[in-house]
Amino acid sequence: MRIAIDWKLRGRELAIFCGIGAFLTVIRPYNATGDLPVWATFLFWTGLITVGSLTGEATMFLMRRARLNLPLLVTLAIVSVSTALATMAVIILVEWLLHGRVMPLAYLPRLFGLVWVIAAAMTGVGYMLERSVLAPPPEPVQGASPAETFLSRLPMKYRRAELYAISAEDHYLRAHTSLGEELILMRLSDAMRELAGADGLQVHRSWWVAKSGIREVRRDNGKLTLVLASGKAAPVSRSFAPEVKAAGLA
């Protein structure tokens, strides 16, 4: 399976990690880096933040794959704990590599507590930042279709495009249109509620497709794939196949 990486998005995330790493370099919490020079302290904290963020993303991905629908606070708690455990493992490894010391088992609970405090804070701040930049629901436009209203979330050049599909990528949505693709920070469930009146349907846990955006329907070894007018292929999962067939698409 080919995984598309949005380098522009990853670049923005790296810039945020560097900013947080610089802040932690200045305040030096717990004096964790001792007498290390500034550049080494910056690399230490930025590396830990990056490891923690990737662990948090992996945890969220696995929870989505398992279709766990947990309360928000429970979800954030699980993410913060997994992040703290991964970060603690890196700290233990760095301590052994740099100083040849193995941390005693009796110290690990205290180390976890110290790390978890920062992990929980970063998890909470990350969630609040994400929610704060979510695009607010656009104002309804008289006579506009649900798809046109959704497209008003995108940059101006997409406002007159035809919406083919939307697909979920981590916390983002990729809008597939006749004028290209664009990422926005939004949940698929929210987008689907906004597009409830549009002529389309969900075909996969991470895909919604407009009927007018389908160019071809392919069947390979019993698996359905919808080819968009842009040439992009949208997978149809088994759980959504009956709805696709009922809509007359297969």
Image (tube, helix red, strand yellow):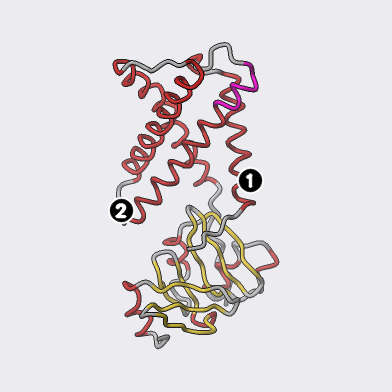
Q: Measured along the vertical axis of the image, is residue 215 above or below residue 7?
A: below
Q: Measured along the vertical axis of the image, is residue 15 above or below residue 216?
A: above
- Mark 2: amino acid: Asn
Residue on which disc 1 sits: 11
Q: Nearer the viewer, residue 124 or 87?
A: 87
Q: Are marks 2 and 1 in contact (CB under 8 Å)?
A: no
Q: Residue at x 55, y 55 (%)?
A: 135
- Residue at the right extreme, as displayed: 157
Q: Closer to the observer: label 2 or label 1?
A: 1
Residue 224 appears left or right of 135: left
Magenta segment, prevailing SS (helix, strand or loop): helix
Q: Residue at x 31, y 55 (%)?
A: 66
Q: Measured along the vertical axis of the image, is residue 34 above or below residue 25?
A: above
Q: Which residues are magenta?
A: 37-44
x and y, in percent, of residue 134 in the image: 53, 51
- Mark 1: amino acid: Gly
x and y, in percent, of residue 178 in the image: 63, 75
x and y, in percent, of residue 74 in the image: 31, 41
- Residue at the top extreme, as displayed: 35
Check if residue 249 falls in the magenta segment: no
Q: Nearer the viewer, residue 82 or 194?
A: 82
Q: Residue at x 45, y 25 (%)?
A: 91
Q: Measured along the vertical axis of the image, is residue 195 above or below residue 125?
A: below
Q: Residue at x 57, y 77 (%)?
A: 143
Q: Earlier in the sequence, mark 2 or mark 1?
A: 1
Residue 241 appears left or right of 136: left
Give the alpha-carbon distance from disc 2 to disc 1, as whole Å.
30 Å
Q: Which mark is residue 100?
A: none
**Residue 179 lies in what quarter of the image?**
bottom right
Residue on which disc 2 sits: 69
